[in-house]
Amino acid sequence: MTSPDVTVTIIVHNDAARLPRAVASVRAQTHAGIEIVISDDHSTDDTPEVARRLAAEDDRIRVIRLPENSGGCSAPRNRAIEISRAPYLMFLDSDDELPPRAVELLLAAHREREVDFTMGAVRRVRVDTGRRSTWMPHLVAEHRTLEGIGEDPRLLFEHLATSKMYRRDFLDRHHLRFPEGIHYEDQLFSAQAYCLATAFTIVPEPVYVWYIEPFAAAAAASISNQRDRMSNVRDRVGVQRLIDDFLLGSGHEGLKEDKDFKFLKHDFRLYAGDLPYRDDAWLASFAEIMNPYLDTLSPGAYGRLPRDERVVLELLRQGRTAEVRLAARGLGHQVAPRRVTADGAGVPYWGETPPTTERARRELDLSELELDTRPFPAARFRHEITDLTFDPGAVLTLTVRTYDPGLRLPVGPQRASLLLTPGRRRMTVPFRLDPVRPGLFTGTVRLGLASASLPVQGFDGYRHPLIRLEQQGLANSSVLLAPPDFPTRTARVPHHTVTVEPEPRGPGRLQIRWRPVGTTARVLGPMARRVTHPRLRNAARLVASVLK
């Protein structure tokens, strides 16, 4: 092809197994005028051979190979830009795909109106569960053209370079290339593209399929899933500093608060969910890298965060690592603190002593949580498992400690229930919480997992038990936090194996998984899935409507 309309670059490193799928998704595009550049970052597996075979099958495919491994995405993308022949460019990772109409849709948006780049929705697919979702759906919900990022700074959250089609002359005019030698290159590249573009168009249709493997082995995990490495933290902070320098040098300092908020709400938040599981040495190293950068962010960005997240950040900045773990557990699940302390004016603060600095008073002030006044169904409690035994017969005995910092529960025994819903039928196991002191209760509950009522076709999935409290006819249901280090236990129950474990990340809830075995797994489950297939359900509805 002498004059392709679009060059799609597929970067690859030691991914011979998935490269053909990525290439096939580009070859299957409804728009045929495509050049495909496979940019191999010096793979040492069968990738070079696979790439050559694919090129032999389609004369639209060209292969380049870097002389040595660059260790990132930037160099293979930049080398491909240099040899691309089309006026429009797209980027694809070898473990992802393009939907069939991706090129057609983005190119049509370019031809509809002269813009510097076009972008669309990203469909995320969980490899372990098959669950599908849309990345940042509120930002790509409608077809629109923006005259610069200032019209919607929220788009800084959508920092993927792969969801966009760029004009080649736009990239060349601004010398816009991916930064080499550092990870999270998409964030700087996209921030620069947003700021330098005079106009760009968004289409709501999916233009990229992003496969997510949250539990991939360490050696195969994506950069985003290597958050335990200090190099990962340094790279993420390093890119943010480069973005700050660019905003200041290009006259876009007015976007600094929006960019700071994006960092706190997205980038830091990814680490926050892991903090309860990090040891003191890790937390100290993390704080050493993170805190100097946190000190450069605008107070307005902190003020836009939920209070729970502001507390975690402030405790980290103060070096209160034990409390960081407590505060980070349950983020996003309305979990109360263990203890609240009021100052002389009655203002409630996180922890056991009132803060002494103006910043700490601002960030640790819990007044907005209304711990003592919000309606009981929305009241905040903290339920923690302090002891757990797994007895024969898949009987789980839990000692539960309930913290009530808003003093919503009267001193005295409290009626409580443990709720668990495998399949569609809920188990309700009542137990009693006895007072230890005002604001603290403890109780024991026995949960017989073998007695759970499961569907005939079996149940394959996770469930996280809740604790329900009742007061004056009103009910409150809250998550149950598990010890982060108790050993995983597995037992056999009717037609299933059941596994009890701590949730491996995030809030750290008690997690129970059922997996069908035997005839249920081999016959009944597949039969039920066929019967409930959307086409069969639609056919059944059609027949029912005709017979009316």
Image (cartoon, rainbow, N blue to C red):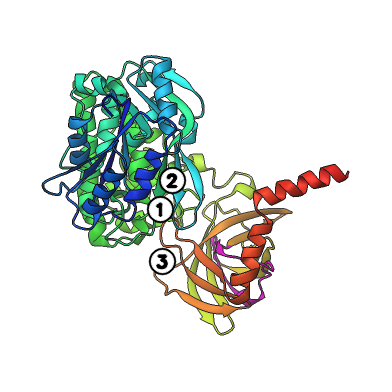
Q: Secondary structure at mark 3?
A: loop
Q: Residue at x 32, y 47 (%)?
A: 94
Q: Residue furthest right?
A: 548
- Nearer to us of marks 1 and 3 is 3
Q: Residues within 10 Å of mark 1 (few under 14, many from 20)?
A: many
Relative to 328, 460 lies left or right:
right
Question: What residue is pinned by disc 2?
Answer: 308
Q: Residue at x 40, y 48 (%)?
A: 211
Q: Amino acid at mark 2?
A: Asp
Question: What residue is pinned by disc 1?
Answer: 327
Q: Residue 320 at x, y = what percent?
A: 30, 54
User: Which quadrant holds residue 268?
Assistant: top left
Residue 484's disc number: 3
Q: Residue at x 26, y 32 (%)?
A: 189
Q: In the picture shown, does residue 479 fall above or below 305?
A: below
Q: Residue 99 at x, y = what percent?
A: 44, 38
Q: Secondary structure at mark 1?
A: helix
Q: Residue 340 at x, y = what percent?
A: 45, 51
Q: Residue furthest left?
A: 67
- Whichever of labels 2 and 1 marks the residue nearer the N terminus, that label is 2
Q: Which residues are magenta?
A: 436-465
Residue 495 lies in the magenta-colored region: no
Tag 2 near tag 1, CB within 8 Å: yes
